């Protein structure tokens, strides 16, 4: 199953809000994925296919392996998130399946 991690500094408000928007978009597209939100220090504990967070968080993220990331300038706009997902190579492959 596809795994998406949404990360923020504390793993509470921002990541939860983005996660809910990601889940709504996945449902809209009819895609199934495991989506979890967490703090930035716990990201490596998950075997994610895609990591999403604010640009600030993504720039400070040190990953042990190559995982595609999406940095967001606007963390509240679902249409912006939708556009960023549709531009992403990994996500485009999921849509094509």
Image: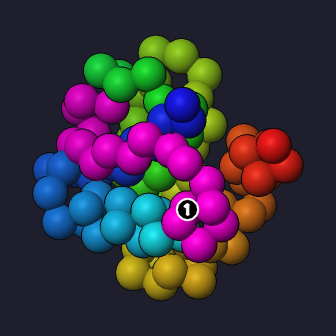
**The magenta stretch spans residue 32:** yes
Picture coordinates of residue 39, whole percent (x, y): 22, 43
Query: Where 48 falls versus 59 (above or below)?
Result: above
Picture coordinates of residue 22, whole percent (x, y): 47, 63
Query: Where 77 falls versus 50 (above or below)?
Result: below
User: Is residue 36 found left or right of 73 in the rendered image?
Assistant: left
Dividing the picture into quarters, in which one does residue 61 lie? top left
Give the residue furthest to the front.
30
Give the residue furthest to the right.
96
Q: Residue at x 42, y 55 (%)?
A: 53
User: Is residue 97 found left or right of 29 in the rendered image?
Assistant: right
Residue 51 in view, yes or no:
no
Query: Where 18 falls versus 49 (above or below)?
Result: below
Residue behind mark 1: 26
Decide which of 62, 68 is in the foreground and name it. Answer: 68
Q: Quarter of the image for the C terminus: give it.
A: top right
Picture coordinates of residue 18, whole percent (x, y): 37, 66
User: Is residue 62 found left or right of 84 in the rendered image?
Assistant: left
Q: Residue at x 46, y 15 (%)?
A: 64
Residue 43 in view, yes or no:
yes
**Number of callouts:** 1
The magenta region covers: 26-43
Decide which of 38, 26 is in the foreground and name it. Answer: 26
Tell me if mark 1 has few (under 14), some (14-19) or many (20+) residues whose alpha carbon lies within 10 angstroms of its own.
Answer: some
Dividing the picture into quarters, in which one does residue 86 lie? bottom right
Helix, strand or loop status at disc 1: helix
Query: Where 7 falls versus 27 (above or below)?
Result: above
Decide which of 49, 43 is in the foreground and name it. Answer: 49
Picture coordinates of residue 17, whole percent (x, y): 29, 70
**The magenta stretch spans residue 35:** yes
Q: Residue at x 24, y 43 (%)?
A: 38
């Amino acid at each position: 199953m596809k795994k998406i991690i949404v990360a923020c500094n504390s793993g509470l408000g921002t990541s939860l809000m983005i996660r809910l928007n990601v889940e709504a978009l996945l449902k809209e597209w009819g895609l199934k994925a495991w989506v979890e939100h967490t703090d930035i220090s716990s990201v490596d504990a998950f075997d994610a296919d895609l990591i999403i967070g604010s640009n600030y968080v993504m720039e400070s993220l040190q990953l042990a392996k190559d995982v595609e990331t999406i940095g967001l300038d606007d963390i509240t706009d679902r249409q912006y998130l939708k556009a960023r997902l549709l531009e992403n190579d990994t996500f485009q492959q999921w849509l094509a399946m």
